[in-house]
Image (cartoon, rainbow, N blue to C red):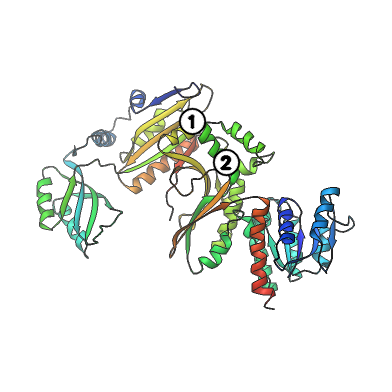
Amino acid sequence: MSPDGGRVVHGVDYLEKKRVSPEPSHFLSLLHKIKDLSFRPCNNEYGGFLQVSMKLEMKDSPGQLVAALKPISDVGGNIIAVIHQRDPDPDGDTLNVQIVLELPKGRLDNLIGLLKEQGVHIQRIGEERLLYQRTVILIGHLMHTGFSDTVDQIDSTGFAEVTDVAMSMPAISDRSSSRITIKAVSRDDMEAALAILRRVARQKALLLIEPLEDTA
Amino acid sequence: MKVALIGLGSVGRGVAEMLAKKDLGLVLTGIADSKSAFMDPAGIDIARVLAHKKKNGSCGDQNLTAEDIIKKADYDALIEVTPTNALSGEPAIGYMKAALNRKKHVVTSNKGPIALAQKELRAMARKKGVALRYEATVAGAIPVMHTLEHGLAGNEILALYGVLNGTCNYILTRMAAEGLTYEQALLEAREMGYAEADPTYDVQGIDAAIKLVILANTIWDNGVKLGDVDRTGIDLLTPDALRLADEEGCTIRLIAEANPKKHLLRVSPRILDKNHPLVFEGTLNALTLETDMAKEITLIGRGAGSIETASAIIGDLLYIRDRYVERA
């Protein structure tokens, strides 16, 4: 119970019950397969591809990053996101990079071998692929305007999803407040997801409160 | 240096008191309120005028007006601190033009004219070889303009964001700390004297947007107007929203931000980590400037108040004295 006697619902369970099935199409079902698998803490497989995230450590010298990423295309893989670690190594001679990639099934061992040959140290492998997280707050007539639809508009993208919801509904006629956590594969995907949410909030006359990021 | 003061509200009174109290080498030769005016080329006895104003409700001769002072008094710099009109900027714009035309420097705390007619007034001052300074229009006592002009000279300003309205910051502080509704926190702000009878300008982000327009035009000279600001106020926030933010170690603040490369000019409530430099309690203001060389600089201080605003005005006056008047 919230302090004013309203009802508070936490977590995704509530949403799962309310979730509307998407239009059955091959494309969407593929996207949803990726999405559902993404909750697993290990490698995600779909179709003939495997999605992996890796944390790599390599020498910080010119051309090293390109050389390290080359084996990925050599095994027929695609890079989805590359994230440089923010804090530099205190000695300054190594570079830490986190990458999300997809590659054909059965090629992971091959890739690991090639990376080792390049002198790249693999610190971690198979982490959660949705690396970017943002929390927003939505205020308004959230249920009357179809909350599960609001969430679905993010989830159905395939590149971002709502992973946590906390909601407070004081009274049926009052405006509700909710805190929504969104995860996405890359910074651009997060921006795209937030753009969708801004549009939905405008259409449904909801107040969307976004986090303040460094803007420059 | 001789100065004339137009406007004897809270800010004008603060300026007059400080001119009387501090030995700044500034001589007041003309003064006007909305009903009367008074001039003396030898220097006005400020204490006497303020006492007269307190007793009779007017500062001087009812047959004289502000225009008379601006057009006839003997002064080097005009201090224009009349109530702001965000729609027309008048009569202040007319006052400033009349002074600039006489080749008199102008110092103002008046946001309306600077948001509406900054370009025109600046061009006029340049043409006449005098200064137009308006440090007090943005973030009260915080020396934003001096920092931009001198401390950060040579830097490219990439973006800025800040808390530019103390009333909203107070309301949000109280909603977060006590779980008050917006209406309760607003009532409290009124009782404390932080909010006007009509709080629209503050709570709907208009005041912050006007300051954002002044900053954007000063820094980037991009001609943006109040209508260009994407603006959301705090009046629809719920205590639950603040509680939901609090559960994550965050809170909500009204943030004004500008980033010309991203075409961003926005005032909106935002979620900030409680450890963020822009999260502080009460009526303070703050501004973060992102620059190419200095990177981030954050200034925090009093955004309003009679003496606090006088501090910004006196800083502008002494700058003019040192730069133009003493040298001449």
Where A17 sits versus A196, above or below? above
* Residue B143 in which image quadrant: bottom right
For the N terminus of chain B, the quadrant is bottom right
Say whether disc 2 or disc 1 marks the residue closer to the N-terminus: 2
Q: Which residue is mark 2?
A: B170
In the rendering, at what x and y percent does residue B257 appear? 51, 51
Residue B110 horizontal side relative to residue B179, left or right:
right
Looking at the picture, how far across and down is residue B9, in whole percent? Answer: 75, 51
Front in this rendered view, residue B94 or B70: B70
Query: Where's residue B118, x and y in %?
Result: 64, 61
- Element on which disc 1 rests: helix
Q: Disc 1 marks which amino acid?
A: Asp
Query: Which residue lies at the image location 37% right of the left edge and 36% below the top edge?
Result: A181
- Tell me: B106 left or right of B158: right
**Type of amino acid at the residue the image marks with label 2:** Tyr
Q: Which mark is residue B240?
A: 1
Q: Residues within 10 Å of mark 2 (few under 14, many from 20)?
A: many
Task: Return the chain for callout 2.
Answer: B
